[in-house]
Structure formats: C-alpha cells, structure tokens
Amino acid sequence: MWVAKRLDFRRRDIAFGLAGCGIPGRRKVWRQRVQNLWSPEGNVVACLSVRSGFDMVLGAAQFPERSEIIFTALTISDMPRIAEHHGMVPVPIDIDRTSASPLIGEIGHAVTQHTRAVVVTHLYGSRIDVAPLVEMARQRRLLLIEDCAQAFAGLGYVGHPDSDVTMFSFGPIKTATALGGALVCVRNEELRRRMRERQSRYPVQSTPVYGARLLKYAVLQALSGRRVYGGIWRLLRALGIDHDHLVHGLTRSFSGAGFFRRVRRQPCAALMRLLTRRLQGDHEQLEQRAAHGAELRRHLDPEIVCPGGELSPHYYWVFPIVVDHPAAVIKALRDAGFDATEGRSLEVVEQPSRGTGANANARALRAHTVFLPFYPEMTACARARMAAVVNRSVKVRGAGPAG
Ligand SMILES: *Cc1c(COP(=O)(O)O)cnc(C)c1O
C-alpha cells in the first residue's frame, strides 16, 4: 500500500535535530543565521509556526475592532480563527475551480471601508500570480498577506517582492520540514519591530518537547514505508479504525486546549538549527516533483480537473484531483494499493451573514477533491498504474447515475 503522504525528511535530519537538542543555547545566533539565510534584507521574523507568525502580525497591526479581513475561501480553519480572536471579521472570497486561485474581481467588490487586510493562500504547492492584487492593495491601503505555507519553492523565493507579509511554514507535513518553524517576511519596519517585541516576551518552546516531537515523527515515517504501512492499514481496517482520522490527529499541531498559549512561543535553538540545515539542503527534489506532477497530469484523462494544475510554477506539494464520486474513486484506488484520501486539513471559510450559498466553488472543491499519493519514493510505473485506476473508476462511475 502506497501511503497517502510521506513526510519530507530523512533520518539524518532527525539525528541532526536530536543532536541540536543536546547542545545548549545560542538560540539568538541560530535565529539570526536562519533569518539571514532566508532573506539577507533583514526583514524576516523566524517564528514557531505560520499560525504563530500570523497571530503576531495581527497582534502588532492593531486594527480597529470589527475590521474586515479578506481570506481565500479555502484554507486551514485556524487562520480565520486567529483573525476572529483579534476581533476581526473574516470575509471569504471564492476560488476558481480549475486554478484554485481567488476570484480577483470579487475581491474588489468585497472591499469596504472596514477592510484592512487580504490573505491570499497558495494551495497545493502551486503559486498564484498576486501582481494584480499588489496594485489594488496599495490603492486601497490594505495589508497584503501571502500564505505560502504550501508553496515552498527553495531558497531564494520568499514571495512576491511587493507583498506586505509573506509566510512560509516548515511544519511536519510541509516541504523541507524542520518539524516546526516558519519564516515570515514583513516589509514594514514598524510592524516588524512590534512583532519582534511581542515575540521576545513569549516563553521559549521546550527543547525536550521538541526532541520528543522529532522522535515521534521519525517513528511515523518508519511506519509509512510501503510494506509496513500495508500491514498497518489492513490491521486498522480489520479493527474498524478510520486510519485517515488517526493520521490526521497524529500529525496535527496545536490541537486541543490552550491553542493561543501554545502558539505563542519562541522557537528553540534546536529548531532554528535544523531549519538552517533544511534550507541549505539541496532542493532538486522540488524540480523532480514538478516534473513528475506534470507527467502524472498527462496520464490522467483530460476531463479530470487537477486544481491549480495550470499554474506555474507548481511543485505539487500534494496532488489533488476533482471527481464526481470521490468515495468510489478512493475505494478503487485503495483496492489497487494506493491510499488516496479526501483530505481533512482545508476548510471553507464561513461568513455567517452571507448564508450557505456563498463560496460554491470552494465548497465543491472541498467535497469532491481526492488527494492521490504522490512523493519521490513512488516509481514512474506506480504513478502510471495509479492514473489508470483513476481513469477507469471515473469512467465507470461517470456512465451511471449519480450517488
Ligand atoms: C500548514 C498551513 C498553515 C499553518 O502552518 P503552521 O506553520 O503549521 O502553523 C497555514 N496555512 C496553510 C494554507 C497551511 O497549509
């Protein structure tokens, strides 16, 4: 069984991280080093996570109560939640079904005198062209924030040069993960100064807890090899345990009580040290992923939509497809040894005042997306076979009645 997702690290990275947990101090030195590495311009704030960084941006910006913040309608639910915590009102903008980009025209309509910020989320490893938004944000004096958590593209790309804030995540399931950490570029000096000041008052993340986290993910990674995982998968199924749910729970950061207390921590020295190593590593894997993703797309029937598939660059952090009957396609794939999932992390940003008719495309994507297993360990032959299974299952279902 090909596991749904392989985490992007090697055993050597874990060993390096664990060694770092045993070396005392020098946190500020490592932080400075990783910040300079990411962008020599001195505008980077290294954070515990994107959620920590976003919380700091909004805390430092001090927008008036009930200010509106525009969001791409599909993102992880903690992002609008953080905005609400700061007294802001999230206003979702629907996305295009094919390109998974926000409907730029609608953003213009959604801006009111209360709007203060726009958060653009780059989904699935692709990159949206934010140039049209840069101009609009400047004219309307909005803070333009790019959520690049899924859009890591190697050292050298830190987001659009004219965005106000760009955020990259190195959390456990992300590309080049350090099992935590985020790098946030903030162009405005005063905003950046206030963020740093806030962060300096946070307690530092516990090094032993970070070490335990490294070990936990090392174990998960060891269990996700094709053979071992197949055995585990069958066992869980026999026991009636929903493996998707289990994996989601195991890989979710900051779940449970005390969200803001846990998000408001400074990253420890060992995390900064491992992040430095990850950034310096070779990222040729990225180009390979882009090429394999494009190839897999060609294997699939042209009527199967791969959201974001036409965007460039696209590094296929994940490989989503949109189908009429996701459950049937997932079943066919699992029977053939590919553990596809419907995905659980992205949610539709709700706006109670607009009723349930809003965000139709985001809702459709949320309901009809299947994530295919896709990572460097998969062979070309496996990818081709997987595409054939998808094509067949879509055809079979497509001919019959819906449901
Ligand atoms: C993962 C992710 C985040 C959160 O990143 P953390 O560093 O784990 O807080 C935010 N937005 C999107 C779109 C993500 O995929």
Image: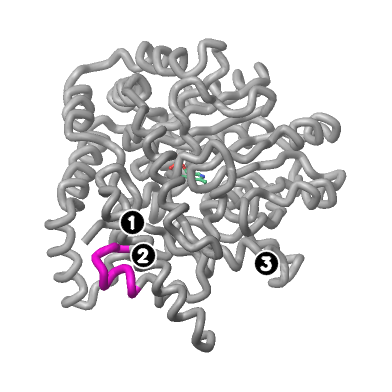
The yes-or-no answer for disc 1 within 8 Å of ligand 1 is: no
Of the two numbered discs 3 and 1 on the same chain, state the one appearing first in sequence. 3
Viewer-closest of 226 and 174: 226
Residue 244 visible in the snapshot: yes
Left or right, residue 152 beside residue 74: left
Coordinates of residue 158 in the picture (x, y in percent): 54, 25
* Disc sitting over residue 278 in the figure: none
> Which of the colour schemes (rainbow, by chain, secondary structure, one colour) is used?
one colour
Residue ID for mark 2: 388
Give the residue pinned by disc 1: 384
Quadrant of the snapshot with the N terminus: bottom left
The verdict on label 2 being within 8 Å of ligand 1 is: no
The residue under label 1 is which amino acid type? Answer: Ala
Residue at coordinates 18% horizontally, 29% vertically from top-left?
A: 12
Residue 241 appears in which quarter of the rendering? bottom left
Q: Type of residue at label 2?
A: Ala
Mark-to-mark CA distance, 2 and 1: 6 Å
The magenta segment: 331-339
x, y percentage for residue 92? 69, 55
Question: The residue tagged with tag 1: helix, strand or loop?
Answer: helix
How many residues crowd around disc 2 within 10 Å: few (fewer than 14), some, or many (20 or more)? some
397 w.r.t. 149: above or below: below
Distance from Cα at disc 3 to Cα at disc 1: 32 Å
Task: Write down the quadrant of residue 364 in the picture.
Answer: bottom right
Q: Residues within 10 Å of mark 3 (few under 14, many from 20)?
A: some
- Would you place residue 170 above or below residue 403 in this image? above
Callout 2 touching callout 1 (CB < 8 Å): yes
Residue depth check, mark 3 versus mark 2: number of the one nearer the observer: 2
The label shown at residue 360 is: 3
Amino acid type, callout 3: Ala
